[in-house]
Image (cartoon, grey):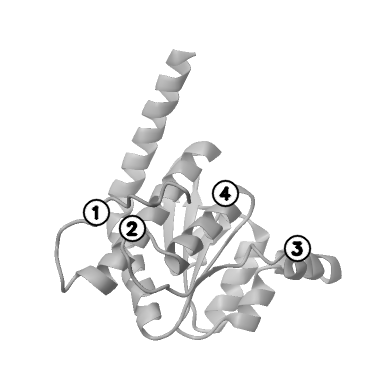
C-alpha cells in the first residue's frame, strides 16, 4: 500500500505542476479581476456541484473571513449554500437553474462569477455563465479534462489536463488558495512589502 500512496502522490504533484505552470498568467489575471471587483464594491460569486461545491464554499470562506493576512472581510459568496433556494428552484423549475436564478437575483455588472467543474459539462454552471454574461459579469472557470462545454463559454478557462477527478480537484484546491493569496497581495501588501505572506498560526481549525 505504500507504493500506492507514493504513486498517488507523484501523480498528483505532476498534474498540479503542469496545471499551475500552464495557467500562472491566468491566475494572476483572475486575481486582478477579483481585486478590481472588490475595489469597486462588487463581489465574487462561486458555484459548483459535489466536491466542487465544497471548493466554492472553501474559497468564499477564505475571502469573507481571512486567508493568511489580517485584513477586512471581502465580499465573496458561494451559490451552493442556501438549501431553501436550491431545493425550491429545483422543485419548481429544474436543477439546471439553481445557480442562474441566484445570478439573476444577486448579480451586478462588475461582479465576477467563478464556476468549478471537473468535467466542464455541468448544465447548471453552463446556464449560470450564460446569465452572468448577459449582466456584464466577468466569468471564469476551474475545469478538468478537455474543459467540456464551459471551455468556450467563459471569459477565462483554467483547465487541469487530467481525467482523474481526484487529481483535478486537488489542482483546483491549490488554484483557489493561490487566488486568495494573490488577491490579498494586490489589495493589501503591494504597497507595503514584496515579501510573501507569513504562515497563519491560527488557521489550523478552519
Mark pair 4, 3: CA separation = 17 Å
Q: Secondary structure at mark 2?
A: loop
Q: Nearer the viewer, mark 4 or mark 3?
A: 3
* Mark with earlier residue (1, 4): 4
Q: Is residue 164 left or right of residue 186?
A: right
Judging depth in this view, the residue of 191 and 22 nearest the camera is 191
Question: Label 2: few (<14), some or many (≥20) within 10 Å?
Answer: some
Q: Give the percent coordinates (x, y) of residue 83.
A: 73, 64
Question: Label 4: few (<14), some or many (≥20) within 10 Å?
Answer: many
Identified at 38% across, 72% down, the residue is 34
* Mark with earlier residue (4, 3): 3
91 lies above or below 204: below
Q: Quadrant of residue 33?
A: bottom left
Q: Give the percent coordinates (x, y) of residue 10.
A: 37, 27
Identified at 42% across, 46% down, the residue is 204
Q: Secondary structure at mark 4?
A: loop
Q: Nearer the viewer, mark 2 or mark 4?
A: 2
Identified at 57% across, 52% down, the residue is 54
Q: Are marks 1 and 2 in contact (CB under 8 Å)?
A: yes
Q: Nearer the viewer, mark 2 or mark 3?
A: 2
Mark pair 2, 3: CA separation = 36 Å
Q: Give the percent coordinates (x, y) of residue 72.
A: 37, 74
Q: Secondary structure at mark 3?
A: helix
Q: Are marks 2 and 4 in contact (CB under 8 Å)?
A: no
Question: Which label belongs to residue 68?
Answer: 2
Q: Nearer the viewer, mark 1 or mark 3?
A: 1
* Mark with earlier residue (1, 2): 2
The reply to whether residue 31 is in sight is: yes
* Mark with earlier residue (2, 3): 2
Give the labeled residue for mark 1: 198
Question: Which label belongs to residue 119?
Answer: 4
Amino acid at each position: 500500500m505504500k507504493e500506492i500512496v507514493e504513486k498517488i502522490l507523484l501523480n498528483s504533484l505532476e498534474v498540479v505542476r503542469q496545471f499551475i505552470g500552464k495557467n500562472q498568467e491566468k491566475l494572476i489575471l483572475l486575481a486582478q479581476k477579483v481585486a478590481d471587483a472588490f475595489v469597486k464594491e462588487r463581489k465574487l460569486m462561486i458555484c459548483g456541484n459535489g466536491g466542487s461545491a465544497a471548493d466554492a464554499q472553501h474559497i468564499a470562506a477564505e475571502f469573507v473571513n481571512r486567508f493568511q493576512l489580517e485584513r477586512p472581510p471581502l465580499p465573496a459568496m458561494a451559490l451552493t449554500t442556501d438549501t431553501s433556494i436550491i431545493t425550491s428552484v429545483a422543485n419548481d423549475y429544474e436543477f439546471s437553474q439553481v445557480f442562474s436564478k441566484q445570478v439573476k437575483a444577486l448579480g451586478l455588472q462588475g461582479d465576477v462569477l467563478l464556476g468549478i467543474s471537473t468535467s466542464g459539462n455541468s448544465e447548471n454552471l453552463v446556464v449560470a455563465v450564460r446569465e452572468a454574461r448577459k449582466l456584464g459579469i466577468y466569468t471564469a472557470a476551474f475545469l478538468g479534462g478537455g474543459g467540456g462545454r464551459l471551455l468556450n463559454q467563459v471569459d477565462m478557462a483554467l483547465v487541469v489536463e487530467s481525467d482523474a477527478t481526484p487529481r483535478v480537484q486537488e489542482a483546483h484546491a491549490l488554484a483557489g488558495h493561490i487566488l486568495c493569496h494573490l488577491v490579498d497581495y494586490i489589495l493589501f501588501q503591494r504597497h507595503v512589502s514584496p515579501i510573501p505572506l507569513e504562515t497563519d498560526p491560527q488557521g489550523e481549525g478552519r
